[in-house]
Each structure stands twice: as C-alpha cells, then as structure tokens.
Image (cartoon, grey):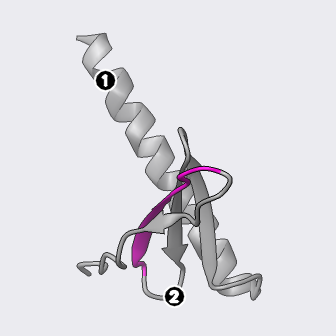
Amino acid sequence: MNLSLKPLALIASLLFTTSAFAGDAAHDGNGRYQAFFNPPGGLWILDTQTGDVKLCINQGPDTAPSCTAWTKNPS
C-alpha cells in the first residue's frame, strides 16, 4: 500500500514546485516564459501569464527544434 502513495507524492511535489516557479516568474518580472527540461531532448515551455504550455523536441545539432502548438490552460 505504501508503494502506491510514493508516485502520487512525487507527482504532487512536482506540480507544487512547478506552480511555485510559475508564480515567481509572473510576479518578479523575470520573464513571461519558463522552460523545464524533460529528457531526452525535450523542453516544456510555460507561459506564466496564461498557463499555456508547449513541448519542443531537439532533433539534433543541425536541425531546429520541433515544437507543438500552445496547449490552452483549461481554467
């Protein structure tokens, strides 16, 4: 039973940490967009004003990254 709580606790802590970073960026004037690495070669980009996100994948040193469209925040 304890094994099933560990993944849930990890997910909750990651969501809390991401929310804390987004809040800091939105209020400190450090920038509207925050990037979060997601190996291998992935990069999540968060719009701290709207909550929208997109995922960019690095295709290699000679190719521009490939990015998805912005995914709208449902709230």
Mark 2: which amino acid? Gln
Which residue is at 51% across, 72% downward?
46
Which comes before the other along the chain, label 2 or label 1?
1
Spatial CA distance of label 2 from label 1 is 32 Å
Q: Which mark is residue 31?
A: none
* Residue 56 colored in magenta in the image: yes
Say which residue appears at 30% left-offset and 12% top-offset.
2
Residue, x 61% and y 78% (percent of image)?
33
Q: Is 30 displayed left or right of 5 in the figure?
A: right
Task: Label 1: state its secondary structure.
Answer: helix
Identify which residue, 54 or 67, lies in the foreground: 67
26 left or right, relative to 57: right
Is 46 contained in the magenta span? no
Q: Quadrant of residue 36?
A: bottom right
Residue 47 drawn above or below residue 5: below
For residue 5, which numbered disc appears in the image?
1
- In the image, residue 8 lies at what x, y percent? 32, 33
Q: Is residue 4 above or below residue 43?
A: above
- On the picture, is 17 further left or further right than 73? right
**The C terminus: image quadrant:** bottom left
Count of number-bearing discs:
2
Q: Residue 41 or 6: which is nearer the viewer?
A: 41
Q: Position of residue 14 (x, y in %)?
A: 49, 46
User: Relative to residue 69, is residue 58 depicted above or below?
Assistant: above
Marks 2 and 1 in Cβ contact (< 8 Å): no
Q: From the viewer's side, name the closer residue of 33 and 41.
A: 41
Q: Which residues are magenta?
A: 51-60
Quadrant location of the N terminus? Answer: top left
Alpha-carbon neighbours of circle 2 within 10 Å: few (<14), some, or many (≥20)?
A: some
Q: Which residue is mark 2?
A: 49
